[in-house]
Image (cartoon, helix red, strand yellow):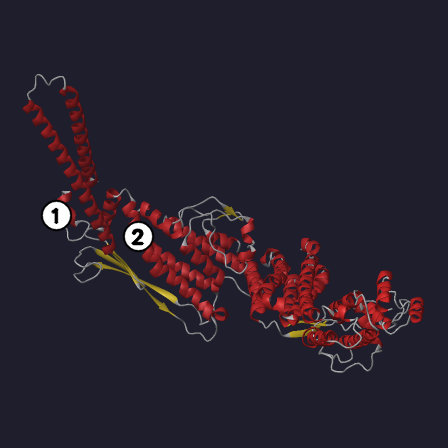
Amino acid sequence: SRAERAVEEAEGGLEMAERALTSTSAADGESGSSSSSSNTPGTSKAAAADLEAARRIAASLRAQVRRRRSDLKHRAAAAVDRSVSITRDGITVDAGDGGASTKKGTTTGSSIKTKSHDSLADAYDALSLLSAGQGLDDAIRLIYSNLYELVLEPLIADHVLSFENGAGPPPTVKLHKSESRGVAAGGVGAGSRGMIYKLDWSKERASSGGAASDTTDPIATWSHVLDVMSSVLKFVKTHILLDRSDLCHMLGGHLFGKNAPSSPPASSINATASALLKAPSISSAQEASPLLDKMVRAMWDTCLPASSSLDVLAGLPDMADSISNRTASFEADLIDMELLLQDTSMVGGSAALSPLSVFASNYERRFGEKRRIFILSEGRDILLKGDYHNTTTVGADVKPDQADSPLEFDETDDGMSVFALHKCSVSQVASNLMALCRQTMDDAVDPRSCAPSAANAALPPQLYRTARELLDLYRAIVPSAYGSEIASVPRTAAILHNDCVFFAHNCLTLGLEYKEKFPANTPRLRQLCTFVDLVPPFRELAERAMGSMIDRQKAQLYEVVGSRISILGDALRANESVVEWTDAETALTAGTYHLRHISQAAWRPVLSRDIYGRAMGNLVDTIFSLFLDQVMNAHDISEPASHYVGALFRNTTRTMVELFVDEGRSASGSSFTSRPSSYTDSAALKTARSSCNYWEKFTAVGEFMYMSLSDITAALGEGTFRSVSGPELSKLIVAAF
């Protein structure tokens, strides 16, 4: 243009003048020494002064050019801002008095000074010329910011909000275009005699008595949003960007990213554990585009059904075709408007122009992914919002073996009790989560889910994966959410143990139960369907939780009992009752009370018979070992002390038998309420003997205290001391006799 040539000529002239001054100064410096004898001092000084004056003039001109350039750039930017008005209710564009400048004057300087309004096209040209494109990009960025924040984002947000709140169908947007000559009113177009173009819109919400998801076709409403966006962008291209390709590319780069996206890798379809519950967003391979991110999330939230009912599965292929066609049409409009660059990346055999087409091409797979995330969210709510302390009874009431000989068999036992889950209490949270896992597997093997027309048979693998991840969620959430209680409260540790045993027992056969139910068109799932690999982690978690609690209770017993009987062995040489004997009785009472409290309030109502017996037997052995260590290491045991120890040990065994009585257990698993009829209660005594490793030894040492040497000799023949080693028995005889 004429202005561009004038600026280039002026800058070129200044550069030539500066080069001439520089060369002249250098030449004068070289010839100064040789001609110093012939030139007068006055002549040299005058030439130097002329050069200095020329330099100052050139520098002044350069500064004026910079100031003028900056002033013109700001005037052009202000002209763009004055010509374009974007609000939440419409867009107004003042095209400017483009022809008035040629009628009023031809020189650039006079026209800039006399015109009352700069045209939008001239403002774009000035910004492009005066700032090497940076000022023009800043102006387009401001247009993008207003267009996104005031028009496009609210349009998408209103659409999504209608579905989230269930407030009826989303509003319908009515567009109204108009054009007129500028008037002398305030605002855009004030004082202008050019054309003013307006695009206004209004939102009309249809009355509906039901939720949006029940009364509205989500694909149709999203298509309406795309139509409105396309109309708005066409208006922007024609009247704001003036159909200029360079401006369209700039705005398109801000709206839809600088680079066209490529197809995502296959691994991106399967979200990682940290993104299980998040909707998909734009690939990190391309520059971030907030608009595309909003659009993809809106399609995820509104265009994908959350349920997997028969009607949804039957209509899924049609929905996929519909959204693919509508997305392709929208992207074609963007390409025609030069707002979106076409790429040759391929996804599913079709060009992937943007994340929108990537989403549409994987619509059926995305449906399975959303179904998976919905189920996982439901599982997370069960784990975090449910009361973990509420329990329910599961398993079969497997009675302990009452046979006195290994060769005796119970005729009522069918031999399958060894594979049964023993009756115990698990948390309601675990029961609900297992029910959700089974429901997910039921959906996975449903023939409707495996039909070739339903999600291209991609739903069953997704659901099978989801069922496994539900169990992983338990291992990830519960130990961390209730870690302090599990480590300090015996009942909570027992519940966690039972939950893990419950899950492990179900995982043993869950894969076999559903493997053959998968249709013939899913042969790989028939081969791979298994949950057995989840059994070891659950068993390890169960053992760790219960083992840590038993160790904690042992430490407390050492503190309650061990500290009081630390010198009992030395006190056994006394011929009369001493304070150490009384302390030993107090320690036994305290330890028994502690065990009874754990039994009644924590473990007996929750644990199965077998686990309860082993856990309680471990703690009883702790008390037995503390007393046995003192007695076995005593160097001198008086006759009164022998009688005291014998009575103490006999009372201890009588008390400990009560911990293993099963008479008072109710059908619901509540704690026992009745005491044993006698010490010889065969069932309780048998359970105690089998559960406690030191029971026989403790009983034998107690009986030893009442025996003479001849009685000991007879007892050796009867096997009474089979649990006591030879050195230990010899040490006892030496100490007692």
The residue under label 2 is which amino acid type? Answer: Thr
- Residue 570 spot, x, y in % from top left: 76, 68
Q: Secondary structure at mark 2?
A: helix
Q: Earlier in the sequence, mark 1 or mark 2?
A: 1
493 vs 298, left or right, is right
- In which quarter of the view is residue 669 placed? bottom right
Q: Of all residues shown, which one is farthest toward the front?
A: 575
- Classify residue 670 as left or right of residue 573: left
Q: Which residue is mark 2?
A: 238
Query: Could you say where residue 469 lies in the image, as x and y percent from the top left?
Result: 61, 60
- Give the CA distance from mark 1 to mark 2: 27 Å
- On the image, which quarter does residue 7 sit in? top left
**In-image side of 551 versus 725 (left or right):** left
Looking at the rendered image, the quarter that the C terminus falls into is bottom right
The location of residue 647, given as percent across then percent down, is 81, 77
Three-letter code, disc 1: Lys
Looking at the picture, does residue 409 appear above or below residue 256? below
Q: Position of residue 64 (x, y in %)?
A: 16, 41
Whether residue 273 is situated above or below residue 424 in the rendered picture: above
Identify residue for label 1: 104
Residue nearer the viewer, 307 or 653:
653
Q: Quick one: quadrant of the N terminus?
A: top left
Q: Nearer the viewer, residue 353 or 655?
A: 655
